[in-house]
Amino acid sequence: MISNKKIPPDPFTIKTWLKKKSPKFKQLPWQFWAVFSIAVSGGLGFTAISNLFLVPKAPNCSTIFWPTASASLRIYCAQIYAQHGTLESLLQAIELVRSLPQDHALRPEIDRSLEQWSTELLNLAEKDFQDGNMNQAIEIAHKIPVFSKSYQVAEKRIVKWQDIWKIGTDHLSQIDNQLRQSNWEYALRLAVEILNIKNKYWSTVQYNGAIKKVQLAQQQHEQLDLASDASKEGGLENWLKALDEVSEIPPDSYVYKQAQELIQKNKYNVVDLVDSNIIQKNWSKVQSIVNSVGNRQVFQAEINRWHIFLTAIEDTSSDNPDSFQNAIDAMKKIQLGDRLYSEARSFIDRWQLEASDLVFISKSNELASMGTIDDYQNAILQLSLIPLNNPRYHQAQELMNKWQASIETIEDQPILNRAEQTARLGEGNVSVLRLAIAQAQAINSGRALFSEAQHKIAYWQEQIYNIEDQPIVDRANYLANNKDYPSAIATAERIPSGHPLYEQIQAKIRHWHREMNSSYNLDRAYEIASSRTPGNLARAIGLAEDIPAYSDANPQAQSAIELWSSQLLGLARDRADQSSYREAIRIAQMIHHSSNVYTIAQSEIVRWLKEITPQQQPSPPQPSLPPQTQTDSPEQTSTP
């Protein structure tokens, strides 16, 4: 750009001018003129270079008044705007130059720029289309100038976009139809086909969304199946499980309608179960079910109603009339039309009667607390005002009986106290004890202290029996200690059944009978053994062996068994000395295994067996047979 400053005169002209102006310049040496010329030339060069680098200040396009702006300024600002590459900047650039005349000198440059900017607009529209902004893409494409070559391209592109978009929406519609019919595989195949749509938005965002939709629909259908199975199994736990499975299924789900139907069905089952237990007044079961239901939103209204019943029942568990009134007020919240309305009204009617009964009961308790006969009688009178059909009638009757018992106790306690004092003074004296019994018998049947009096009478009667029967027991024991068992038994049998010592003496009688049998068997064994034959000695050992260990005769029997076993060993040795080894062995085998000579006998048997020749050797010795089977005579033992 050329500067408006004046150009200095040529240096040679200045020199000539100086010579003309002053004759003194002629007298200056030539060296001065050389230096002066160089300085002037350098200054002019610096000024020229500085002016060369001076650029005019760029105009501010945002502040220009366009109706009066020049074409070159419009073109300049349009290029500046277009460089930003945004929709707004490109449209501004086009708007600035589209109104310029067709015969403008810069028309070729203007048309080239318009085509370039239209192409960039179409690219922006394509990007919006690929990003899924279909309407915005069409809107941008429609802004391309009609006179540009890109306009026709844009129109065709719009048709193509709409076709592609329709393919995608048709796929989504088909997927929806298949999901409603639970055709998971076909729906998934349709979702995969979306990948083939030539659009980035459809092949990524819509594809992922379709896959997730299929997976979510399948998952929700599986939830519905699990809930249906649980519901069919029945029971509170399964009903609640079914509700939990489907309660989170959203309204836009393909199985939402079925889920809601299942929710209503299982909700009805739970509500019916709770209401049935309320009608049956099974409150612990109701509380347990309500705890299991928890805070599930689907039961919110029912939970409030159930808590009304539970709270009211808790309030009426006491005998406070105010608590009953609170329960009545709460129960009135159950509205007409509720399936438990009649039950609520029944409770209200009952509790109103109970509240009035409790007034009489409270007054009765207050009077009875004074503790006198008159107070108890007045307390009973208060309770008698409660009608037969009232809820608290039976409680009133129990309290009346209690107060009547208190009256009877006050009246009869002195009688029982006198009888007890008499029995203590006459302890061990039958006549005095009988007097105490007669005094206690004055308390009649049905009175409050009758059972206690009868218990004491029985105790004192036992004392009388013991006093009367103890000498008999002592005499029987004396006779038994002297082995006179028949007399002891006859004496003991004088104690009749029912006396305190009866069972004790009967046990002794049974023992004495066993002692008699043991003594008889031992005497019989001695008698049999007196013949000292091997068979009879074995029989005697058998009888003695049957005598019980607890019998007084058992020690003597054990001594006899030892004696008779020694005698059998002697007889066996005698036979062996006579070389009758077989007979010796037979006799030795009769020796009792508990005797001290049993081991000696076994050793002798082994020795005698060696004495027998191989041809005569009998079978090895067997365990000794029961002595009673080895007899020398048919004589049998008899028992008295």
Image: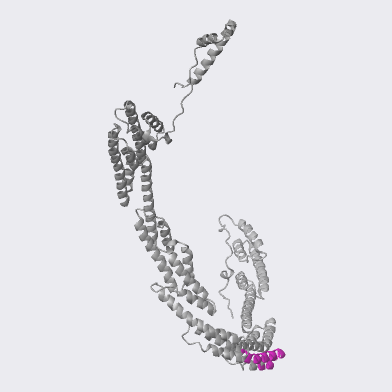
Q: Quadrant of the C terminus?
A: bottom right
Span shown in magenta = 409-435
Residue farthest toward the right in the current orientation of the protein: 425
Percent x, y for residue 154?
30, 35
Query: In this orientation, which residue lies closer to the viewer: 397 or 211?
Result: 211
Q: Residue at x 57, y 61 (%)?
A: 622
Does 285 sit left or right of 587 as displayed?
left
Question: Is residue 630 visible in the rendered structure shown here?
Answer: yes
The structure residue drawn at horizontal position 38% and vertical position 35%, both measured from the top left corner, is 66
Nearest the viewer among 101 and 416 is: 101
Q: Looking at the picture, tell me which residue is in the foreground, 31 or 569.
A: 31
In depth, the one of 104 and 183 nearer the eye is 104
Q: Quadrant of residue 441?
A: bottom right
Position of 398 relative to 65 (above/below): below
Image quadrant assignment for residue 475: bottom right
The image quarter in which residue 524 lies: bottom right
**Residue 498 visible in rendering:** no
What is the chief secondary structure element of the magenta stretch?
helix
Q: Position of residue 384 (x, y in %)?
A: 52, 89
Q: Residue at x 37, y 45 (%)?
A: 209
- Residue 608 vs 151, above or below: the answer is below
Relative to 103, is 144 above or below?
below
